[in-house]
Every structure is written in structure tokens, then in C-alpha cells.
């Protein structure tokens, strides 16, 4: 691709070529049911974890895990501006 003109490269970088539009998708209702079940399970696990915490040291560890997760979400965000 190094010897191609920009118009030649554009043929390979078309959105249609890498798009998932041609793939068959599941129903929206199934995804909604899955999300509802996952939310209930996540809430139960969060409650169990918060109920089991004893002492300030475990709260500090939980806070570090949460902050690390938030930092990871920021780092992999596709809408984030690239440096440079």
C-alpha cells in the first residue's frame, strides 16, 4: 500500500469493506433481555461484594480497582483525541 495514491488507498478503506452491516444480527428484543438479566446479576454481585467488605483497607482496594477500571475506559475510548 506504500506505492499507492491516496485515491487507490481510499478504495481499500471504504466503510463498506470493514462494516458489519452485511452480517446477520440478532433481534433487539434478545439483546434487551440479556441486558436486563446481566444488570440483575451485576447488581446482586455488587451487593454481595459491598456486604463482604470489612475494614478500611478493603475499601481502599475496591476504590483502586474502580479507579483503574475508569482509567482503562478512558484510555480505550474510540472518541478520545489522539495525542500529537
Image (cartoon, grey):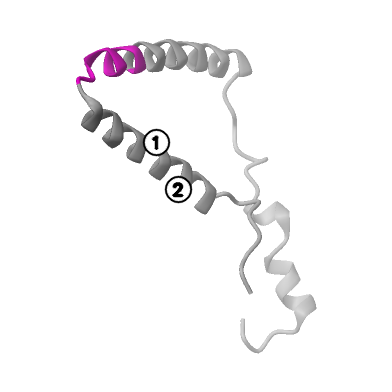
Element on which disc 2 rests? helix
Can residue 59 be seen in this snapshot? Answer: yes
Circle 1 residues within 10 Å: few <14, some 14–19, many ≥20: few
Q: What's the residue at 61%, 69% (across, down)?
A: 83
* Disc 2 packing (10 Å; few <14; some 14–19; many ≥20): few
Image coordinates for residue 17, horizontal then vertical, percent: 66, 56
Q: Position of residue 76 (x, y in %)?
A: 51, 51
Q: Is residue 50 left or right of residue 36?
A: left
Decide which of 42, 52 is in the foreground and name it: 52
Q: Is residue 76 visible?
A: no
Quarter of the image with the N terminus in it? bottom right
Tell me what residue is drawn at x 62 percent, y 43 percent.
20
Answer with the quarter of the image where residue 13 lies. Answer: bottom right
Q: Is residue 62 magenta?
A: no
Q: Residue furthest bottom?
A: 3
Residue assigned mark 2: 72
Q: Residue at x 66, y 60 (%)?
A: 81
Vertical comparison of 48 with 14: above or below: above
Which numbered tag is attached to residue 66? 1
Residue 51 lies within the magenta run: yes
Residue farthest toward the front in the current orientation of the protein: 56
The span shown in magenta is 46-54
Amino acid at each position: 500500500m506504500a506505492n499507492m495514491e491516496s485515491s487507490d488507498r481510499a478504495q481499500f478503506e471504504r466503510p463498506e469493506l470493514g462494516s458489519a452491516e452485511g452480517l446477520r444480527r440478532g433481534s433487539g428484543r434478545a439483546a434487551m433481555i440479556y441486558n436486563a438479566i446481566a444488570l440483575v446479576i451485576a447488581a446482586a454481585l455488587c451487593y454481595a461484594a459491598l456486604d463482604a467488605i470489612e475494614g478500611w483497607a478493603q475499601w481502599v482496594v475496591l476504590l483502586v480497582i474502580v479507579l483503574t477500571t475508569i482509567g482503562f475506559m478512558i484510555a480505550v475510548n474510540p472518541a478520545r483525541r489522539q495525542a500529537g
